[in-house]
Image (tube, rainbow, N blue to C red):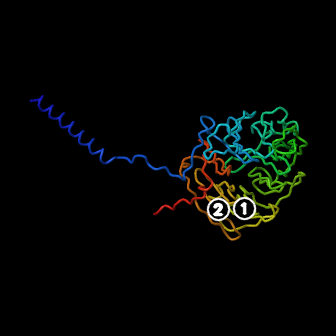
Amino acid sequence: MKYFALSLKISTVIALFLFVSSCSKDVPLEPENEPENQSSWTIDERFVYQDKTQLYSVKISDKLAMIGPYGYTTLHQSEQASPQEMNDIQRYAIYFRPSVSVKLPISDRYFVGASMQNSAILFINSDHPVSSGLTASLNIRNVDPDFIEMLSIHSHYGESMAINNQNQTLMAYRATSTNHSTVKLLLVDVDPGGEGPGIPTLLRIRSTKVIVLDDREHYGFDMIEAVDDHFLVSSQTKTLVVEKDGSYRSVLDRALLRVFKHNDKLYGFGRDGKFYQSSDKGNSWKSSFEVERFLSDVSFTHVEDQLVGYRYGQVWKFDFNDSGYEVEELVNTGLVGNLITSLNEFDGKVYVTTLSGVYYKPLEQFFEIKPKESN
């Protein structure tokens, strides 16, 4: 009797399994061959393992240059629609270890390398980063024996040094003073060599100048930006213009946390929570219209002369004018959950670097507006 009951149970289970299997053939539980979203971001499969992490990038001449924790990478223009050709990419070892929290500038002629914990600074040719004679080093202690440490800005808010169009680099550091420390700036005049990009000759440092700030007013460091041949520096209490000869003056009695250029004007977010604008390359500022507070956390760049902002894994298109601004979020399928570190238009595509991969999208698909979520 027990054997009969057990056999009946087994038969019932087998019959139920066959029934479910036959039903599953007619009504799939999950859709097969789900169509791909043609506007999604595609990962560049040339960046794998440690090269997935790229900290910042910039378009220089006909290349896209990137800095990661393990090296310097350049992408070159390709005839392929899908950028997967290995001969269109070059990787170089570099003589410093970049930090995830620090961005350093890259120009058409050279880029800066530094470990912010010590006094050594490198100036490296952007086209030939490992060639003999194309790297110059500077020890700040040899320029100023009172040097204590380099000052940096978190990479989320911008670069910690700046290069102007005169091949000058400006940086900030803390130095000893009478019974306390003070903030100083160092202006380095660099001769990148050659007649232009792609013509390697000796890179050298022409001169250096220490700029001593009034320590009663300048005790921190919020922002440093190059604007044509001069610089903007914020020191937590004021915003300064530093000229190419090393002279400086206050242009705003507030510190700006971030500035960006749009339609021949500069816009800036103040530490006081206000929004400012300048029509004369940062030499004077006026309080502007109100903006949402989250915009001070957005990084700005340009794609096809359109102002684009990004934060975490989101991307927006902006338009600022004298009376206000408009903003539309762009499709970010494929980027959700990533931390964007830079965004650049290059070779008919838009590239984003992140801490977990390099992604691209055809330029003609980039400005697709993200549908608004219904309530």
Q: Position of residue 181 (x, y in %)?
A: 81, 44
Mark 2, residue position: 318
Q: Nearer the viewer, residue 250 or 206?
A: 206
Q: In the image, which disc is placed on residue 262?
A: 1
Q: In the drawing, does residue 206 fall left or right of residue 105?
A: right
What amino acid type is highlighted by mark number 1? His
Local packing at callout 2 (Cα closer than 10 Å; few below 14, some 14-19, many 20+) is some
Q: Quadrant of residue 290?
A: bottom right
Q: Position of residue 239 (x, y in %)?
A: 79, 57
Seen from this angle, which residue lies furthest top?
A: 3
Local packing at callout 1 (Cα closer than 10 Å; few below 14, some 14-19, many 20+) is some
Q: Nearer the viewer, residue 36 or 188?
A: 36
First of labels 1, 2 by sequence position? 1
Q: Quadrant of residue 191?
A: top right
Seen from this angle, which residue lies furthest bottom?
A: 323
In this view, 323 is above or below 127: below
* Secondary structure beneath label 1: strand
The answer to whether marks 1 and 2 mark residues whose Cβ atoms lie closer than 8 Å is: yes
Q: Nearer the viewer, residue 135 or 61?
A: 61
